[in-house]
Amino acid sequence: MTVNKATTPPSARSTPQVAIIGSGIAGVSAASTLALGHPESASAITLYEIGRGPGGRAATRKTRAIPALGINHGAPYADISTQQGQARLQTLGAATRPYRGKRVIIDGQSGQARARASSADETLITGPDGEMANIAGAMLKDVHGALLPGITTAYSSMVRGITRDGGGDGQWVLSDKDSQEIGRADWLVVAGSGIAHPRWSATFGGEPPLVLAAAMLNDPMLDAALATIAQQSAAPVLTVLMYATDEVAAQWRELGFHDGLIENHPVLAKVSIQPGGESQCAVVLHSTIDYARENAGVYGSSSSAARIGDASSDSTREEILIDEMLSALASIPAMPRIEKSRYAFGPLLHRWGNAFPEGPALPADLAVCSHARVAFCGDYVRTAARMGSYECAWLSGIRAGEQIGQS
Ligand SMILES: Cc1cc2nc3c(=O)[nH]c(=O)nc-3n(C[C@H](O)[C@H](O)[C@H](O)COP(=O)(O)OP(=O)(O)OC[C@H]3O[C@@H](n4cnc5c(N)ncnc54)[C@H](O)[C@@H]3O)c2cc1C
């Protein structure tokens, strides 16, 4: 696991210690809200994250082999639509810039494209350099690029077990897959519903860690929160990532759009075209939810769930699914034909097992269980913004940070 500590010495920190499980936008905004809102107490905040850095479903895929490559393989941009979100945008300063990609809607049968209008009260944003992960990355840092005081990051680190030391009054104790303790905290922030949701059992086996821990606490509010989360389901999406240069990149750059929502197609829902530099281009194909559901159990061998969490993945089917998604693209008139060998990176498959949560959002009044010292944030929690959106996750993280800070 990669641990990166801010400069505040442990002796200078005062309570509460806060463990945030998940460094997507929700976990990061909870951490930065706490760190910025309570500099005097400089809470000891640790962000645990399975992936190699912050971002979660709004992450940017990188590779050391091609330093210029950065592929937004989850959310290609974020749409901020609520008044609350619009007002908060100003506080993000240089962490974002407007997304200026041209958006179209493509008919999956005829290939005809029409413009996709933005509504007047919607602002589209991306990272300062076009990389979505860098919104979250920038939020964790001060103007000099140092981690905000009080924050420690633990990347490539999956929380597999949660217990409460000494029962009700004790600290939360977090452990890894070898049952080794990896941290302790007074507050637990569940910034990604995985450790609390029944889907944990299918992916990793056993009961979800927070459900096991809650059984020992008998806290009615926490139990009610977990019961609501259990009613939610996860809509998956498969993505195929590619990166090309020169004339192969030019084929994509010349299409004249960047975000193509595909209608009337059984396999593909979106094509995201992400030009970089003068002659490079990343492309991400998004499957329909139905297609991803029909092809469960294939994660993509490089996904964090498979790499760190040992989620079982049928790697023999990866190439088959890639080929099916590429053929599906080829079936849409006017789309480029893909010769795999001409791509500098990919095509590579990535499964988002929980791309979009569905079902009842966790009500705001169950999101912070003060007695149990558990806070929930993420796009599965009710806010003014649409459930399953970046904005929803962001606003819920701010609220969790504020409420823990006031407790
Ligand atoms: C393909 C795709 C396209 C999308 N398009 C859009 C869009 O156009 N507009 C929009 O608004 N939204 C879009 N979204 C949704 C948006 O990305 C999410 O709503 C948002 O990023 C969720 O943020 P989050 O912080 O709640 O969760 P996440 O980003 O999922 O963060 C949770 C984090 O927790 C980590 N984690 C989970 N369990 C553990 C554990 N046990 N230990 C350690 N770490 C753990 C995960 O690795 C993850 O990084 C899209 C999503 C996908 C997948």
Image: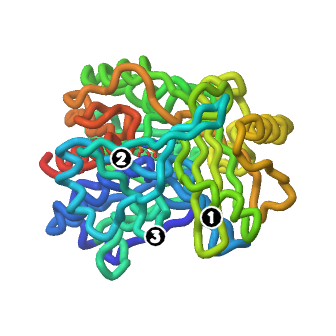
Q: CA distance from mark 1 to mark 3?
A: 14 Å
Q: Residue at x 76, y 56 (%)?
A: 346
Q: Amino acid at mark 3?
A: Asp
Per the image, label 2 sits on a secondary structure element best described as: strand
Q: Earlier in the sequence, mark 2 or mark 3?
A: 2
Mark 3 is surrounded, within 10 Å at the Cα level, by few (under 14), some (14 to 19) or many (20 or more) other residues, namely: few
Check contact, mark 2 vs mark 1: CB within 8 A. no
Query: Cα distance, mark 2 to mark 1?
Result: 23 Å
Q: Name which residue type carries label 1.
A: Lys
- Secondary structure under badge 3? loop
Q: Is residue 392 visible?
A: yes
Q: Earlier in the sequence, mark 2 or mark 1?
A: 1
Callout 2: CB less than 8 Å from ligand 1: yes
Q: Is residue 386 above or below residue 120?
A: above
Q: Does residue 241 sit above or below 218 in this rendering?
A: below
Q: Residue at x 79, y 37 (%)?
A: 327
Pinpoint residue 385: horizontal percent, then vertical percent.
28, 37
The residue shown at (72%, 69%) is: 245
Q: Is residue 241 above or below residue 280?
A: above
Separation of residues labelled 2 and 3 (CA atoms): 17 Å
The numbered dot on residue 129 is 3
Q: Are marks 2 and 3 in contact (CB under 8 Å)?
A: no
Q: Earlier in the sequence, mark 1 or mark 3?
A: 1
* Viewer-nearest residue: 332 or 87: 332
For the N terminus, the image quarter is bottom right
Which labelled disc corresponds to residue 79? 2
From the image, state whether disc 2 or disc 1 is nearer to you.
2
Question: Which residue was labeled with disc 1?
Answer: 62
Q: Is residue 21 left or right of residue 351?
A: left
- Between residues 320 and 31, which one lies in front from this camera angle? 320
